[in-house]
Image (cartoon, rainbow, N blue to C red):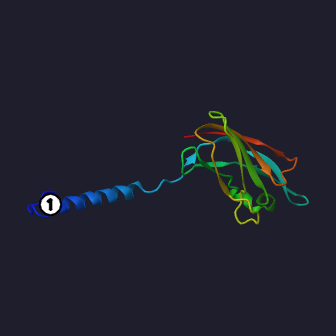
Amino acid sequence: MALIIRKGRVTVLAGAAATATLLAGMAAGTAQAAVIGVQQVPATGIVANSFGDWRLYTASIRIDTGSERGEVKLSAPGGAQCSSYGVSSKTVRFDYTNVTTGKTGSGTVKPCSGTVSSVPTSVVLHPGSGQVIGTINISAEGGPWQIPGGATFTVG
């Protein structure tokens, strides 16, 4: 940007630098959560809507990147299965171990929003960076009619 006016040249260059910095900051934006690929065998259970109305419920987990390194967000979206009362009253628990660091923990979520349960639909876990393995369980009256699932994923 060459200008003939020498007096205002410093002001114009400073203004251009400030504009470039502002545009670069806008382009960077805020970090967005990204889905982390999870290798899993979902937990499966039998739920009862009423006497004689039995259905299978398959509980899969979803893992998204967290806002900090080694942090992830756990959810277990029930999708179309949420139309069944038997599913909407359940919760899903994920117990994990980071095999890289040895750190363990768990998180419990509800698969369906709008239920009266105080359990959230997503929780933040802090497994740390590395390979994470764990079990998926249907809880809250999961009863003997459920088979736990398993999952593994890598946290950056």
Task: Tell me the quarter of the image containing the N terminus.
Answer: bottom left
Q: Position of residue 129 (x, y in %)?
A: 58, 39
Q: Position of residue 18 (x, y in %)?
A: 28, 59
Q: In which quadrant of the rendered view does residue 112 lie?
A: bottom right
Q: Position of residue 61 (x, y in %)?
A: 68, 48
Q: Residues within 10 Å of mark 1 (few under 14, many from 20)?
A: some
Above or below: residue 105 compared with residue 81: above
Q: Camera-side residue: 97 or 145? A: 97
Q: Which residue is the extreme one toward the top?
A: 100
Q: Camera-side residue: 120 or 6? A: 6
Which residue is rendered at x = 83% and y = 46% of the image?
Answer: 146
Task: Kindly identify the amino acid type of the residue bearing the numbered disc 1.
Answer: Arg
Q: Which residue is the extreme one toward the right?
A: 51
Q: Which residue is mark 1?
A: 9
Asked if one can make out residue 41 in the rendered structure from this viewpoint, the answer is no
Which residue is rendered at x = 91% and y = 60% of the image?
Answer: 51
Above or below: residue 103 compared with residue 82: above
Q: How many marks?
A: 1
For numbered disc 1, what is the local secondary structure? helix
Q: Camera-side residue: 81 or 1? A: 1
Asked if one can make out residue 108 in the rendered structure from this viewpoint, the answer is yes
Which residue is rendered at x = 88% and y = 47% of the image?
Answer: 144
- Locate residue 39 relative to residue 54 in the image: left or right: left
Above or below: residue 12 compared with residue 44: below
Q: In which quadrant of the rendered view does residue 116 lie?
A: bottom right
Task: Tell me the quarter of the image containing the C terminus.
Answer: top right
Q: Position of residue 128 (x, y in %)?
A: 60, 41
